[in-house]
Amino acid sequence: MAKITYIEFGGTEHVVDVPNGLTVMEGARDNNIPGIEADCGGACACSTCHVHVDASWKDKLPAMDAMEEDMLEFAYEPDEFSRLTCQLKVTDELDGLIVRMPEKQI
């Protein structure tokens, strides 16, 4: 289990325990965290679970594959800290992860 902090665009924080094996997106969905829409249900076929990971986590996450990289081109204002939460599988190593939602999902 990992404690993950989801921060809405307006600054509201949600700190939740997410079981290992789920994705960061599923953790948001299961805890009714606003700001992650996940229209495709986690199939990496949209960009509506886009977040900006905290800078301290950028190099601690698994590498991004080509499909995620392609989907991020459709996200709202992606940057070097952008990831799709459907592609981040929760493990003990993600304990303490901080993600920030963009102003909107597209």
Image (cartoon, grey):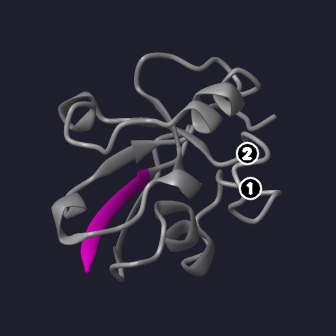
The spot of residue 18 in percent (x, y) is 37, 77
Judge left or right: residue 2 versus residue 43: left
| Left or right: 55 as drawn, with respect to 80 | left
Q: Residue 56 sits in which quadrant?
A: top left
Which numbered disc flags the more N-terminal residue, 1 or 2? 1
Residue lying at 78% horizontally and 43% vertically, measured from the top left: 46
> Alpha carbon of mark 1 to alpha carbon of mark 2: how far?
5 Å
Q: Which residues are magenta?
A: 1-6
Task: Give residue 83's mark.
Answer: none
Q: Please, what is the three-letter code of the amino acid marked with disc 1?
A: Glu
Residue closer to the observer: 14 or 77:
77
Q: Which residue is located at x 28 percent, y 43 percent?
A: 61
The quarter of the displayed image where residue 15 is located = bottom left
- Identify which residue, 23 or 8, lies in the foreground: 23
Mark 2 — residue? 48
Relative vertical location of residue 17 with respect to residue 86 in this rendering, above or below: below
Q: Amino acid at mark 2?
A: Thr
Residue 35 is covered by the magenta coloring: no
Residue at the (19%, 64%) spot, across then down: 95
Residue that badge 1 annotates: 37
Q: Secondary structure at mark 1?
A: loop
Quadrant (top left, top right, bottom left, bottom right) of the N terminus: bottom left
